[in-house]
Image: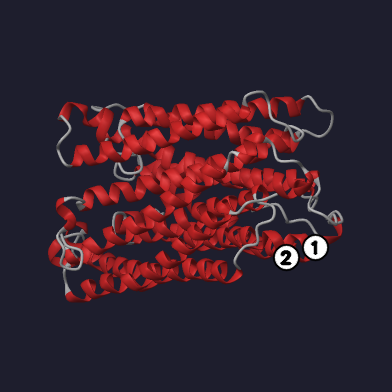
Amino acid sequence: MGVFTSTRRRRPVAPEHDPIAKIKLTPSQKALGKYLFIVVALFSLQVLLGGLTAHYTVEGQEFYGINISEWFPYSLTRTWHIQAAMFWIATGFLAAGLFLAPIINGGKDPKYQKLGIDILFWALVLVVAGTFIGNWLAIAQIMPAHLNFWLGHQGYEYVDLGRLWQIGKFLGIVFWLVLMMRCVVGAFKVKGDKNLLALFTASVVAIGLFYGAGFFYGERTHISIMEYWRWWIVHLWVEGFFEVFATASLAFIFHSMGLVSRRMATVAALASASLFMLGGVPGTFHHLYFAGTTTPVMAVGATFSALEVVPLIVLGYEAWENYSLQKRATWMQRIKWPLLCFVAVAFWNMLGAGVLGFMINPPISLYYVQGLNTTPTHAHAALFGVYGFLALGFVLLILRYIRPNLQFDEKLMKMAFWTMNIGLALMLFTSLLPVGFIQFYAAASEGLWYARSEAFMQQPLLQNLRWFRTVGDMVFIVGALGISWQVVKGLKHKSD
């Protein structure tokens, strides 16, 4: 992720033993196991909900003849599917930061750090439970209508949770920021180069505060204004600042392992962050296509959004650089699977976020394909392919260190890793994308209304293509449950 662009001759000599493994685990780091469990629990729930939601598109209200929509309608399973993804991916990122914090602080916890991590965990559980229950009560029309916005369902994709739970999520992220800064501030007092630390700190602050953009609209705000601020969360908070945090975090991790110099880690992190933010911030405007955005602003947004593909393609080369780290020291084999997840991140960043994103971002493409199956093609490849694999990589990395005697089940991990990648590819290229292309032709020749109509979507060819998605879904679900089982087994493993 932007750390290994230096030549081999400029890399430091790899240490004989893992420097991070030599650091005694702090109480707060040992307490992160429950975060990892929540990540894989929500991940497993999300993929099962995804399979169910996709099935509704071919059988309507039924699941292989069983009318379960009376209890779990399409609108509810779709909402839970998206919210579960946002929660488990964010939790994986928060856990990564909390694991790094004591390392940054010289291998020790600030006072009451473990207590803070425990409080944050149970606050997270409360927000997740409140969100899911509120969504169900609102969609089932059990909750009084005047409470829907605050406790039930805001009605906007990716920020579906009620405003009260949104506030709780923001306060939790701010609390995480406080826990992080307690460690980071102390590190700034130590003499030496602070540039990499400054980049990491800036990314932590951005993640902590920019989620607050979701509070700049209310229940009665005009949809054009609401859409503007909602895309600050979806595009800037997730696609922008999470990317910067990931780059800076991996730079810090690999520098702490003694595999790259501080200077090269800093340069690479700064370069990657600059490229993503340069294209990402003005590129946000391409999301405002149907919100009355003026032509010049749309032109700027489309241009910079299209340019985002450039750094993403560069990451494809860096995927191999990341994987080649295994050969630098024998102990690197112990983190083979986290590294492979980071390789997958780079690949799907290039393909899912870059190529498939570029396909739908230019103005003429947006006019015809926005809201068709071309959009979820990009969304699945980018959200899971990039941030999903990244969060899973963080989880496996943390698990490796908090359970130092654990040996990953090679057969299970190999099966899980490759079936997730193959399943995702099958889902995209045998179903979602072909349906999207057929819809595109209909939108260009007849109109968007026709391409999304029931009469068009229920044609035998499109029905068969959506049925065929079941194959990719099942392959992916097997892999997802496999990696989740490996994490659960690892957490149960007793380390000396």
Q: Amino acid at mark 1?
A: Arg
Q: Position of residue 213 (x, y in %)?
A: 42, 30
Give the residue pinned by disc 1.
Answer: 328
Residue at 65 percent across and 44 percent down: it is 249
Q: Nearer the viewer, residue 253 or 376?
A: 253
Distance between the Cα atoms at labels 1 and 2? 8 Å
Q: Around disc 2, counting alpha carbons within 10 Å, would you say few (fewer than 14), some (14 to 19), or many (20 or more)?
A: few
The secondary structure type at the circle numbered 2 is helix
Q: Amino acid at mark 2?
A: Ser
Q: Position of residue 400 (x, y in %)?
A: 65, 53
* One can see residue 278 in this view: no
Which color mode does the image show? secondary structure
Which structural element holds mark 1? Answer: helix
- Relative to 143, 354 lies left or right: right
Residue 219 picture quarter: top left
Residue sitting farthest toward the left: 455
According to the picture, the residue beneath numbered tag 2 turns out to be 324
Compared to residue 153, the image places residue 412 above or below, namely: below
Left or right of residue 150, residue 323 in this image: right
Horizontal side, residue 258 vs residue 2: left or right: right
